[in-house]
Image (cartoon, rainbow, N blue to C red):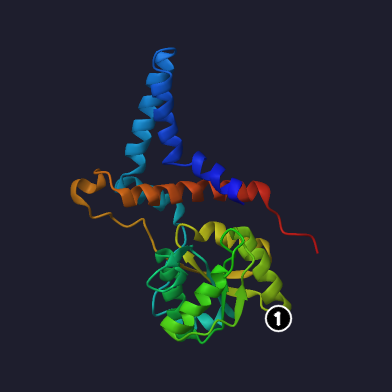
Amino acid sequence: MTWRYIIKQLAFPPSSLLILLLLSFVLRKRWPKVALTSFILGVAGLYTMSLPITVEYAARALETEIPLTQAQWPSLNQQADAIVILGGGREVNDPAWQGDQPSLMAMQRLRYGARLAKATNLPVLVSGGLHFGQPPSEAQIMADSLAEDFGITARWLEGESRTTWENALYTAKILQAEGIQRVLLVTDAWHMPRSRWSYEQLGFSVTSAPVGFLSGANSRPLNGWMPESKALWQNTALLNEAIGALLYRLSYRAPKP
């Protein structure tokens, strides 16, 4: 798992772009044309990946699911039998809380899932695995936050998964064993198409409940053409999602009964 993390971080921005800049310096005397190409790609990549305008247009390509309206919330229990909230990372060893806490992205999902649970009275499953094999699971952290911050008790905890596909796979083992086939799925809007596809491959009927849209007008000065550190993180997440969506359809199939 550690090596997988290292390889992934080196392959994605900003590490991959910094490597290009380092290569341009190392190769500048022996292969100046290669060095110049590497430098241009590195600088152009860093600039593009740090722009809010890039976030806006990249998210538009990924966020294909329509958001729910609050008027729809009370009737969602006619379309689903359980709410599934996918994990969105954690903050490790937060001194204020004396332990791991849900990340800001995870809290956004939890808040939305909690609102839906109160509106529909549907039972909740939270899904998320361990941090490099170390407990508590992300599902446990999410369940604790749901109870303590939102007054919602998670009925099921899926604490083994490491990927979106495993979220669906291990959720199926829990819910389908109880005859539940229809789920209201909560995750970020840009992550929803891959998540929905994974759950449908495992036999679920999915009602999407996307949150955290990034495709709205960025409302920045100069229309989002000024670099921002936040945009660099968001664009990296969107790039990871675009690649993941493609690879999932090539790599995964539902297990045979």
Residue 184 versus residue 51 in the image, above or below: below
- Residue 159 image point, x, y percent: 62, 69
Residue 146 versus residue 12 in the image, above or below: below
Q: Is residue 135 left or right of residue 65?
A: right
Instruction: Tell me the residue at 39%/69% (across/down).
Output: 95
- Residue 233 image point, x, y percent: 39, 50
Mark 1 neighbour class, 10 Å CA radius: few under 14, some 14 to 19, many 20 or more: few
Q: Quadrant of the C terminus?
A: bottom right
- Residue 117 image point, x, y percent: 48, 82
Instruction: Tell me the residue at 37%/20% (across/down).
Output: 36
Mark 1 residue type: Glu
Residue 41 can be seen, yes or no = yes
- Residue 158 image point, x, y percent: 62, 71
Residue 8 versus residue 88 in the image, above or below: above
Q: Which residue is mark 1?
A: 178
Instruction: Tell me the residue at 41%/81% (across/down).
Output: 149
**In-front residue for pair 196/43:** 43
